[in-house]
Amino acid sequence: HRVVVDTIRQRLQPVTDALSIPTEPRLMKLANIQHLYTPIEATLTNDTHILDVVARLHPTPALGGSPAEIALPLIAELERDSRGWYGAPVGWIDHRGNGMFAVAIRSALGVGQQSRFYAGAGIMGDSDPHSEWQETGVKLIPNRNILLTKIFVDELVRGGLEAVCVAPGSRSTPLVIAFAEHPGIKVYSHIDERSASFFALGLALASERPVALGCSSGT
């Protein structure tokens, strides 16, 4: 993390009038993993375009190694598969030069009936290969869950499901998103799980059709 932050500082300094970087990183806790992160703020010089910044920052050492002039040729030589869009800067710009870009790390590429998931780990000299491999697997869980829930919802629709009542919670997020994005399902959202279950029961009785209930607990 420190290597990445130091490199970003060096690359941004020539094109900024003001650059703010905290001395210590913060901890970002997500549902299945946690990260160190450092929020960096800068004021660009008037003649600096956002694409100039993208060109300076890509790739960071997290994806391209350090020093880049040594690491990048080694990566090209040793990696067996093409990264494709993995690790690329993805975003948008407008005619005023405003924009937003992110690094496409944990991501998925769908082609026809096939999906390929991407994730990686930052390898240092003292990294343990086994633990890094396990960490990479953990990073793939959210994408895997999204794919599995889409398959699950498709099967429910094939079985005649047309409506679902949801009481959203963090543990059911992938399933709720899959319900909401399916064109063949009408979603009814409720804050309370008990009211959602009674509504689902009434809707099923009235329509004489199956109705699903999605919630986070065993209520």
Image: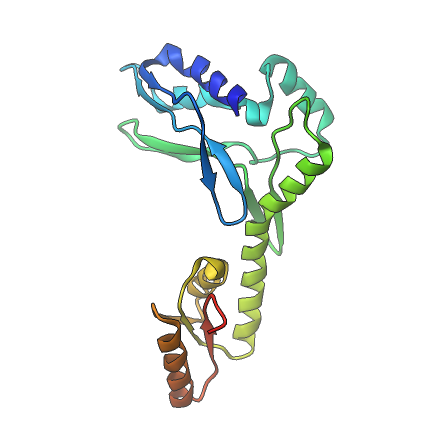
Classify 180 as above or below 165. Answer: above
Q: Quadrant of residue 51?
A: top left
Give the residue drawn at x 55%, y 32%. Answer: 87
Residue closer to the observer: 95 or 170:
170
Classify 184 as above or below 205. Answer: above
Q: Position of residue 92 (x, y in %)?
A: 38, 35
Q: Quadrant of residue 162?
A: bottom left
Q: Quadrant of residue 185?
A: bottom left
Q: Position of residue 183 (x, y in %)?
A: 43, 67
Q: Position of residue 209 (x, y in %)?
A: 46, 85
Image coloring type: rainbow
Q: Position of residue 205 (x, y in %)?
A: 41, 89
Give the residue drawn at x 68%, y 21%. Answer: 125
Residue closer to the observer: 30 or 83:
30
Number of numbered discs overlaid on the protein picture: 0
Classify 45 as above or below 60. Answer: above
Name the outermost residue toward the top: 14
Classify 176 as above or below 31. Answer: below
Give the residue drawn at x 41%, y 84%. Answer: 201
